[in-house]
Image (cartoon, helix red, strand yellow):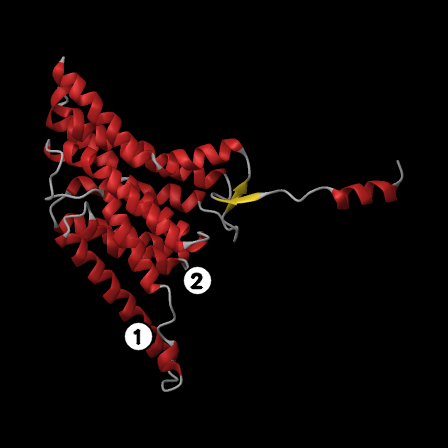
Amino acid sequence: MGKGSRNRKARERPAEKLCTGFPTENYRILKWSAMLTLGIGSFGTMFHDVTGLGDIGRHVMESIGYISVPLYAFLQVKSFHYTKSKSKHLWKIFLLALFSFIPFSMMKTGSPFALNLQSACVTALIGFICLWLADRDFKKPFAQYIRNRKFLQLISGSARGLIAGTGAVGAYFLHAENGLYALPMLMILDSAEQSRHKKFVQGMALAVWCLLMVLSKNFYALTALIALFPIYFLQDKAPLFQCKESRFNQFMLKAEQKFYPAHLLIMMIAKIIALAV
């Protein structure tokens, strides 16, 4: 076969299909790390009284569960910036929050319709809305009147801080899980995406989270600092947030999206069976 024939066939070969998802295996490792630690924390909360773990075992497992909070916050920032349709993504989070309502209420209170505590999906919903509101150039309306770049940055930072504070207060009144403390961390992680010192700002976001949790006298949440290591070493420099089009990747993407309500539902059914036996 001549060289010209090989080049012609190479040009005729169809382009590799891509889909919205994770760019490399690194992000999949981050997502599954978040799912695993979240599952351990949920198990400790749900089954400590059935399995006889005691307070120490429960607190150890819940401490592991706190590692998932910054991991999910980091991944939410990534998914926000690379999603094709923000409105569809927001709708998906709303459905996840809706389907998680009864299992989460059963896990936390034993009642199927408790309103005094909402799931982390509600926190994610508020966080996504805050990211959407903050995803605009707040400096533009003032740029024609103010030439000082630092002052313009101060205006932009103040606007983002106001959005984060409003979201945190809203999450507090809605009783969203970790909402009061996770929203500032989420907004700082979002700011890190445009920062020259990206990994330093990400570390600062986790430090803010841990400080807020310590001030609330929740010292078990300090384990969340462990999440800094996978975030630091596994995040990619690739600008594209894509994966190869395949049945396996499509299945994995759907499984990862539905993990939160699914694992709560499975644990709820398992606990009902365990108590009945």
Q: Secondary structure at mark 1?
A: helix
Q: Residue at x 33, y 58 (%)?
A: 131
Circle 1: is it few (<14), some (14-19), or many (20+) Cα within 10 Å?
some
Q: What type is the residue that disc 2 sits on?
A: Arg
Label located before the other in sequence (1 or 2):
1
| Towards the viewer: 58 or 179 | 179
Residue 48 occupies quadrant: top left
Disc 1 versus disc 2: nearer the observer: 1
Circle 2: is it few (<14), some (14-19), or many (20+) Cα within 10 Å?
few
Residue 114 at what x, y percent from top left?
Answer: 11, 39
Q: Is residue 148 left or right of residue 158?
A: right
- Residue 181 can be seen in this image: yes
Residue 204 at what x, y percent from top left?
Answer: 30, 55
Residue 155 tag number: 1
| Towards the viewer: 210 or 125 | 125
Q: What type is the residue that disc 1 sits on?
A: Ile
Relative vertical location of residue 105 with respect to residue 211 in this rendering, above or below: above
Residue beneath disc 2? 196
